[in-house]
Amino acid sequence: MSLSLVTLFLLSIMVFLGGQVLPGNVGRAILGPFADQRAVEALNHTLGVDRPLLTQYATWIWNFVQGDMGTSYIFRSPVAPFVIGALGNSMKLAAVAFVLVVPIGILGGVIAALNLNRPLDRIISLGGLSVTVLPEFVTGIILILIFGVWLRWLPISAAWPKDAGFFTQLYYLILPSLPLFLVLFGYIARMARSGMIEALDSDYTRTAVLKGLPWRTVIWRHVLRNALLPTITVIATQTGYLIGGLVVIETLFRYQGIGSLIFTAARGKDFPMLESGILTIGIVYAVATLIADFLYSVLNPRIRLGSD
Amino acid sequence: MSAVQTTSPPPDDTRRRSPMAEVVFSLLRSKTFLVGFAIVLFWVACALFGEHFAPYDPLADDIINALAPPSREHWFGTDQIGRDVFSRVIVGSRDILTVAPLATLLATVAGTALGLLTGYFRGIVDDVVSRILEAFMAIPVVIVALLAIVALGTSKTTVIVVIGLSFAPIIARTVRSAVLAERELDYVAAAQLRHESAVHTMFVEILPNVIPPILVETTVRLGYAIFAVATLSFMGFGIQPPSPDWGLSISSNYGMIGGGFWWTVLFDALAIASLVIGVNLAADGVHGALND
């Protein structure tokens, strides 16, 4: 938990440096090289970027905490509604990917471990590993070609028609979520597999088998419960990668999520939008880590929060 | 100097090999490594000598033959301004195979130095630095790159520095844990008793003994660096037109994918996939050979 707070702080410093300090003259960057010097100074004063750095940082964080994310340089309106709307869209996409990948990834790992060193294990392990190492946009392009262009089963853009219902939206989100699924599948399956192998090999499993418990009970009550603990930690650490992947996938599928929001903001030098978008992502990451810590302690009676 | 604990060769092995030869020998026996290495070698050859065996100039446009599907004249078809896709895919390996290895090199040098320092000195410096590095590792490379490019502008150098510095903490962590084990060994104590300087002990005594884990981590990182460079050029950061770079080609052609012009992106995508998988197979082989 404390670590994700350090990450968040570090991220806020980086965002602040990258968005407000390093680009130099913000007013000049917005108005262009031919603008009048007085106009640039006036704009800098309006934006508050001519004040001392510490003051700027403190004001920025203080406003952010209160929900004031500043005004977009490009849209000339408050940033917050854009960020919140985009975050909602990204959450939908990430949710579809997670709902697919967590059970299937764990199942894949469990099946691989139960068929250790047999062909099925080889296929799952090697297949999982090869799709995990591929960049999301590469698997994305290949999937678009297969399912969108050749088979015509799924739409190639994630932009659903207006007033689309839940299932229509889901239909549009399947293809964009698949590259994220593939990247995460290998990690989750590998962790579940090695956790299973370790648990299957343990003394308590042997005891459970020897005292005559049915195989099903041994697996469900004894092996899985221990095997899946490390997997949960991995799933949480993958949220970071997932966010990186969202930037790429949302650009590829033209989806109005937080990833494409910060990408567009970066290209247009819309610093308030960029800063708020990235900081929001950082907060989501910290919350995800917290939830994972909590889940871990619920599932693992040996570690209870605040017991030491 | 060497404190590598060489295991005695099995009795049936009459010839004694040096540890280095042993590693090379087991690499050559590893199918995984050989397949991966062959793929990488193929793309390196394309990067070095590509324009000599590419049938067309990868930058020459030919508007009349734009968007022609694969044919006998153009094996992989032509793109939207009539450039030969086959030639572009072959020469397109050059930029990524320059930027990614340089980034990996930077990450390895910086990471090794950091890992040696934190592992050797431990204490409060190690605690603070390790914590910051761990926190930094949680930030996705794409986000760091986005910020750096907005602040510093787009260039190959920015990409090399961003990826290099993003990966350095990961290598530092590996080196640190290897150094923590080494520093308890007698040869380090001996060096300290001789009043060798800390720099000497770290870089001359310990470093040679932690080379194997560094090598493994470097080959693995190279795979991720290629992943990152390809992604960043797809996003339009780093490698710039008119380079026939694969990620860049996909980004400028995928908009027309709905029109059925699959050949403008498929071959570039497969090229990236083959290179990434090749590097990972080779890395897997190196890992196996050094951990026998």
Image (cartoon, rainbow, N blue to C red):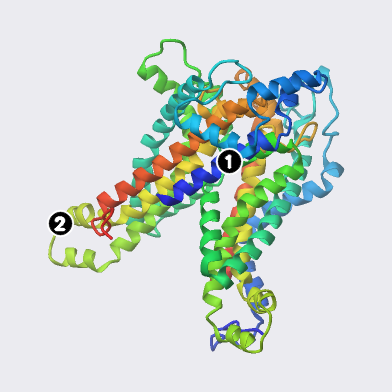
In the structure shown, which secondary structural element does the residue marked by tag 1 occupy? loop
Residue B263 location, x and y as percent?
67, 28
- Badge 2 local density, few (<14 within 10 Å), some, or many (20+)? few
- Tags 2 and 1 touching, CB below 8 Å: no
Find disc 1 in the rendering and name its residue: A135
User: Does B4 sit left or right of A31 as displayed?
Assistant: left
- Of the 4 image quadrants, the one containing the N terminus of chain B is bottom right
- Residue positioned 72% across, 31% down in the render: B76
Give the alpha-carbon distance from disc 2 to disc 1, as whole Å.
Answer: 43 Å
Q: Residue furthest left?
A: A212
Badge 2: chain ID: A
Mark positioned earlier in the residue sequence (2 or 1): 1
Q: Is residue A121 left or right of residue B138?
A: left
Q: Is residue B159 above or below residue A147?
A: below
The image quarter in which residue A284 lies: top left
Question: Can you see residue B247?
Answer: no
Image location of residue B227, percent across then percent down: 62, 44
Examine the rendered structure and indicate whether residue A236 appears above or below residue B268: below
Q: Quadrant of residue A71?
A: top right
- Residue B169 seen in render: yes
Q: Nearer the viewer, residue B217 or A302?
A: A302
- Where does residue A307 sit, x and y in percent of width and height? 25, 58
Q: Looking at the rendered structure, which numbered label has been put on residue A214?
A: 2
Q: Is residue A132 above or below residue B245?
A: below
Disc 2 element: loop
Q: Which of the 4 quarters of the picture holds residue A171?
A: top left
Q: Amino acid at mark 1?
A: Pro
- Looking at the rendered structure, the number of numbered marks drawn on it comes to 2
Q: Which mark is on residue B242?
A: none
* Type of amino acid under label 2: Pro
Q: Position of residue B268 (x, y in %)?
A: 68, 36
